[in-house]
Image (cartoon, rainbow, N blue to C red):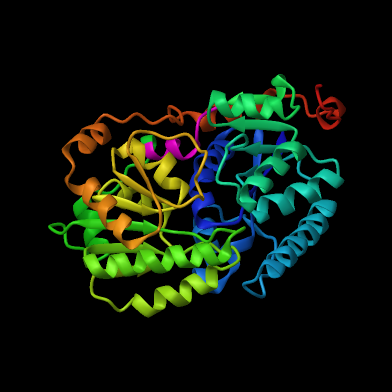
Amino acid sequence: MRTIAVVTGTRAEYGYLKPLMQAIQQENQLTLLPLITGMHLLPEFGNTDQVVRDDFPNAVTIPMPLNGDDLKDMALYLAAGINSFATYFDSHRPDLIMVLGDRSEPLAAALAALYLNIPIAHINGGDVTGGTLDESIRHCLTKIAHIHFVHTKTNAERVHKMGEEKKRIFVTGALTLDAILHLPLLSKKEIFQKYTLDEQQTTFLVVHHPITTLKDQGYSEMNALLQTLDTLKKQTVLLYPNCDAGGKRFISLIQQYEKKPHLHVIKNMPHREYLSLLKSVDVVIGNSSSGIIEAPSFNIPVINIGMRQQGRERSDNILDVEAKKDRLIAAIDTALHNDAFAKKVQHTKNKFGRGDAAQQIINVLKTIPLDETLIRKQIIY
């Protein structure tokens, strides 16, 4: 019986990981160890640890305090996480840890596990996104990890070019598509009623995060976006940003607008409800990866702002735009009223898999040898 520790640090990441965690839990050759950390534990972001505990009551909390909003505070956040994970892993040694993506929380867990010779599996390596801090963390995790589960063949090629052996790399598609294709989502009527939205109105879903290497630019993007939304006055659901440096400034800015009648500001939303809303709105706006990876499955137009997702593979439903009010208004008009673009959106295909990533990952976790050969990595060229 292999114990698989799955690390979750944010609400969005948990939505991706949940199908895999459920699959591990149902597999009689594996034992799930859920580890909650990071943004889940921060009150200003809604204490979403309870969302995980509702699904997995045996989840363990790994403290990772964040005491400020500057880049230095993010470095200290990472250091605190390494310390907490190292302490936990030293006394509770799973057979393998699973981490996803490109944030400080999985990096902290992986660095701690690396020094304790615990095998690491990384999901979503090989992506390219805008030259931000996330980019560096993602590629760092690739070099730390011993097993790679990637979205696409292109991503697999990038991981291989980073010196990783092909036998360690598995193309599974995106885990979030497992939820999209297999979860019973709410109807538009149900999800709009839940969040007190008018079904008859044009509706935007906005998710916009800080840019870790260009914090001031991220803030100016958010400011331009909020001004645009205030001009258009369309019904808008706006989710809080993540806890990267600058996130608290984003929240302060959002709070200046949140009493506007067109704006529905939500700190966090369960993934099933988020997907249900995503498939029901008219346009998705912001710089979240969900616009790139998830929205194509629902044939929803996406206005992707700025450089945060630059370099990531695109489906035909994406409009890339600078964060300037006139350009945002023009892009929104195209998304709502351009017949040629509407036809492209209607026929778009999702490039990120078939919705069976969890089972593919399970098959590897059950059979791959967890021995010194796996732990002892060497660059292949």
Asked whether the viewer can see residue 339, the reply is: yes
At x 63%, y 61%, the residue is 38
Left or right: residue 336 versus residue 298 is: left
The C terminus - image quarter: top right
Segment colored magenta:
172-180
Left or right: residue 36 versus residue 191 is: right
Q: Position of residue 57 (x, y in %)?
A: 57, 56
Residue 7, relative to residue 268: is it above or below? Answer: above
Residue 172, relative to residue 264: is it above or below? Answer: above
Q: Position of residue 281 (x, y in %)?
A: 25, 51
Q: Position of residue 68 (x, y in %)?
A: 65, 75
Left or right: residue 273 versus residue 341 is: right
Q: Magenta includes 15?
A: no
At x 55%, y 43%, the residue is 129
The N terminus - image quarter: top right
At x 87%, y 28%, the residue is 372
